[in-house]
Structure formats: structure tokens, C-alpha cells
Amino acid sequence: MHLKDLAGILPVEGTVPPDLEVTGISSDSRQVRPGVVFFALAGSKADGSTYAADAAGRGAAAIVAARGNAISGLSTPVVAVDDPRLALALSAARFFGKQPETMVAVTGTSGKTSVAAFTRQIWEQAGFAAASIGTTGVVAPGRNEYGSLTTPDPVALHKLLKELADAGVTHASMEASSHGLDQRRLDGVKLAAGGFTNLGRDHMDYHPTVEDYHRAKLRLFDTLLPKGAPAIIFADDPWSEPTIKAARAAGLKVLTVGRHGDFLTLKRVEHERHRQRAEVEVDGVLHEIDLPLAGDFQIANALVSAGLAISTGTSVGKALAALEKLKGAPGRLDLVGTTSAGAPVYVDYAHKPDALENVLTSVRPFTTGRVVVVFGCGGDRDRGKRPIMGEIATRLADVVIVTDDNPRTEVPETIRAAILAAAPGAIEIGDRRKAIHDAVAMLHAGDTLIVAGKGHEEGQTVGTETFHFSDHEEVREALQERAA
Ligand SMILES: CC(=O)N[C@H]1[C@@H](OP(=O)(O)OP(=O)(O)OC[C@H]2O[C@@H](n3ccc(=O)[nH]c3=O)[C@H](O)[C@@H]2O)O[C@H](CO)[C@@H](O)[C@@H]1O[C@H](C)C(=O)N[C@@H](C)C(=O)N[C@H](CCC(=O)O)C(=O)O
Ligand SMILES: Nc1ncnc2c1ncn2[C@@H]1O[C@H](COP(=O)(O)OP(=O)(O)OP(=O)(O)O)[C@@H](O)[C@H]1O
Ligand SMILES: N[C@H](CCC[C@H](N)C(=O)O)C(=O)O
Ligand SMILES: [Mg+2]
């Protein structure tokens, strides 16, 4: 590719030779090789323009930086743009040049990973080669890889989308995190539809207010989706209304789902412990759906997923039939086993207040004994959520065990103390392994144990080191010990 092929994205006239050969693009100077265009981004820790000389020294073809940047004295051409992150996303899309034909993105505080996984499964059942991209990684035909970010950065994302398209994937669902939306990571993706699940407290270390957080989420609807594209919005959340309003104002085709939904209307639900039977009305016709998943919230996720699939061409019959075969995303109210007395043990990814509230509420109707919860809060993340989660656990569980969950560079005792301050009577066991083993050991018939916060994760980050740790493995081991 030549620099001129990025015309319309980068102002390449004048100072920059348009026939300059471009071999790649990067926002990390350490990855720059000869011919790579380096995008200098202002980040949360560093300002990329301070690495312009480093990139130039490694043979960068050109440097793209914010207008008014302080880069000077380099022989490498500097291209000034208004929004370097947007320029990076659009350039990455142009450079890699290919993506699955039908792509959808879902946003919301909770349920994104589940919706992305369910939408992929519906498409698979309908006979499409489909992929999902998000917190738990990339799943596609012949591919199942662990991921690190919920929404990958634009260069990694478009490289991946090209690989998927080259491998014959025609349909892909992806998670749109608020960081991803705010940082323009998805701006180069051609989206066919978007979904919204709910909004609660999250990432208050990054977004100054919940309104700012909501505004970041709204970018999916008011900026990224083309006019007329379907927006599938869960209708029963306190933030549904402003989201619907914004999507309508942006000229999208708003399709709501849920009890208050008019596209897929939830008429009735009967919960069982590990499954639920729902009645959903579509176009005046009632459909009975036997959803093989625990947790009230999974109905919401299933409806948003069905809405995304139907609005992008899957038939109503095929989409609803596929719901009966859904498998939960790994670590989302995931039944790992039961004690010999029949007490179930679930691993769940609830690491924010609303999610914890939902998961504890979901298991209560099937618990004749006690609800026991083991959880902690991550270090170097939103501190405000700690007492909130302590209060929720104390209100909704009978036994609360406060433990560590990725303390990172914070002092673990301090994190636990902040939770315990709002959790009178809670038991403190810092060592997560011991906390899980003790919790399993105390279960009687009729009890339910929820190990929350890590879900699919396979590590515990203490300081800057990550040790192998899996809630699934610990629960299995503890159940075996008890059975022995
Ligand atoms: C706070 C945040 O979102 N940071 C992300 C962001 O980094 P940043 O732009 O702030 O980077 P920075 O460290 O300040 O550096 C600025 C620039 O200098 C460059 N640099 C730096 C050093 C050097 O030697 N040379 C160089 O060029 C960096 O590559 C960067 O472009 O952009 C990077 C590239 O896309 C991301 O990897 C990085 O994610 C960090 C690792 C992270 O932890 N992000 C989390 C909070 C996140 O994004 N989470 C969301 C939501 C999770 C969920 O709720 O599901 C997600 O989508 O995963
Ligand atoms: N629709 C929902 N409403 C409320 N809580 C939910 C919903 N879906 C999932 N949860 C809870 O949130 C947890 C995370 O679910 P999921 O991974 O699907 O969401 P996410 O939006 O991808 O979260 P993250 O941003 O952490 O990756 C689940 O383990 C469950 O406790
Ligand atoms: N994407 C989230 C995941 C948090 C999971 C929890 N286990 C924690 O470490 O706080 C984050 O990095 O903030
Ligand atoms: Mg996720």
C-alpha cells in the first residue's frame, strides 16, 4: 500500500510524498519496522508524540500526530490530524481491507460477552460461518483463543477481521466496551447492527460520571452505526429510555426487546434451577422457548442476541429455535459441580455491583438453605464500587466471604477492608484458594455457592506478576476433596 491509499483519512497532500510505501501501521513505537506509519496517541500513561523520535529511528515511513503537536527536528514526514485515534482506526480498516460481511456489536455494562457468544451460536445454528470477539477471546471455526482486551485495539482488530474473512467467516459479533468506544477502537468497523443490554456502575476510574460513561456507550448508536441500521435495545433497564431516544435521534431502526419490548416481547417466564421457560411474542405470534441457562438475566441476553441475528437476516424460527441450544459463555453463572448433598457451586464473572446483585438474586428462588458468596474487588480499579459490593453481598447472601481478586499494585488488605466496611459479619480470607475450599466445605443440602469476580480468568495478578489461578480448578478440587 502507498500513503496515498490512505487519502480521505490522512491529509497526504503537500508535505508527504504520496507514493511512499507503507508496510504496516502501529501506535506503539516499539513495534515500528521500516515502512510502518506510526500513530502518536495521547494515552492515559504516556503521550505517544514523545516516542516519535524512537519510531523515526526504527524506520517509520511517516508519523501521524495531533494537530499542534510538539514533534520537531525529524527527517521523517509528520502528518497532522484532528483525531489521531480515529485516523488510526480508519487507517487500520483501510490497510487490512477486509472484514466479515455481517458484523454486529453489543454494548452495555453487563451481558456483552454473553450476547456476543449467543449471537455467534445462533448464526452457527442457522448454518453461517460465524465468530465472536470479546473478553473471553476469539471464537471462530477452528479457532478458540484467549483475548486480553474486551475490544481489541484497531490494528489487532482489523488484522483479526481480515484473517476471519479470509478463512470464510461471514458473520461476526463483537463486544463494544466503553473504553473501546471512547478510544475509537471500533470506528473502522462496518457494522450492520448494534445491541444494548443495560447500564450500571462500572469503570468510574476512567469515566468521570455515569453520564459520561453512558455517552461513551452511545457512540455505538449515534456515531458508528449507519443511518437506518437496526439498534436492538433491551427495554427493561432504567437506561433503556435515554438509549432508545438517542438511537432514534440518530436515525436508527430501533427494535426493543424484553417485557416492555415491541420487537421481541417477553410475555412470561418460569424459572427452574438450571433452565427457564419463556413465552415470547413476535409479530403477534407466541413462541415457547426452553432456555437451557440459569439466571434471569440470561433471558435479556438471549433476546438481544436473537434480535441481532433476526435483524441481520436470520429467520425468526431459526433464531428462536437456536436459543434452546445455547451454551453459556465460560464463567458466566457456570455450574461447576454439586456437593454429594446436591448443593450447586457456580463460578460467575460478577465483578461490578449490578452484576453481583443480579447473580445473587437469580439463585435465591432455588436455594432452600443459604446463599454463600466468595468475592473480592480488583486493585487499581474503581475504588468506589468496593463498599457498594460489600453492601449488596451482605443484603443478598447469607454467608459472605471476602477474598482477593487481582489486587495488582494495591495492598490487598486495604481493598478487603473497603469491602468489609460495608459488610458486617463477613468472613475475611485473603487467600482465594482457601476461601473457595472453606466455602465448599461449609455447604449443606439446599445451599448455593457463588464464586464471583473471575469467571473465565486463569490468573491472579499480585503486584505486577500474574500467577496461574482458576476458580473452576479450585472448585473442582474442593468438591473432590469433600467427596473423598
Ligand atoms: C486505560 C486504557 O484503556 N489503556 C489502553 C490504551 O492505552 P493508552 O493509550 O492509555 O496507552 P499509554 O500507555 O498511555 O501510552 C500512550 C501511547 O504511547 C505508546 N507508546 C508507549 C511506550 C513506548 O515505548 N512507545 C509508545 O509508542 C503506546 O503504545 C500508546 O499508543 O490503548 C492501548 C492500545 O489500545 C490499550 O492496550 C490500553 O489498554 C490497557 C492495557 C487496559 O488495561 N485497558 C483496559 C482498562 C480496557 O481497555 N478495558 C476495556 C473494558 C473491559 C471490560 O469492561 O470488559 C476493554 O475493552 O478491554
Ligand atoms: N443482562 C445482564 N444483566 C445483569 N447482569 C448480567 C447480565 N448478563 C450478565 N450479567 C452478570 O455479569 C457478569 C458478566 O457477564 P458478561 O461477561 O456477559 O458481561 P460483560 O458485559 O461482557 O462484562 P465485562 O465488561 O466484565 O466483560 C455475569 O457473570 C453475570 O453475573
Ligand atoms: N475488564 C475488567 C475485568 C475485571 C475482572 C476482575 N477479576 C478484576 O480483576 O477486577 C478489568 O480489567 O477491569
Ligand atoms: Mg465482556
Image (cartoon, rainbow, N blue to C red):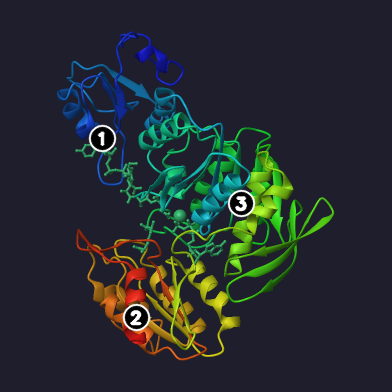
| Viewer-proximal residue among 435 and 261 | 435
Q: Percent from the top left, x then y, of residue 175? A: 49, 48
Residue density around tag 3, few if under 14, some if 14–19, many if 20 or more, within 10 Å: many
What residue does disc 1 label? 28
What residue does disc 2 label? 480
Find the distance from the CA under tag 1 to the CA under tag 2.
47 Å
Residue drawn at x 68%, y 34% as measured from the top left = 228
Q: Percent from the top left, x then y, of residue 60? A: 23, 22
Asked whether the viewer can see residue 239, the reply is no
Find the distance from the CA under tag 3 to the CA under tag 1.
35 Å
Q: Percent from the top left, x then y, of residue 80? A: 34, 22
Q: Nearer the viewer, mark 1 or mark 2?
A: 2
What residue does disc 3 label? 305
Residue drawn at x 48%, y 78% as measured from the top left = 392
Badge 3 marks a residue whose secondary structure is: helix
Does the beta carbon of the residue at mark 1 sit less than 8 Å from ligand 1?
A: yes
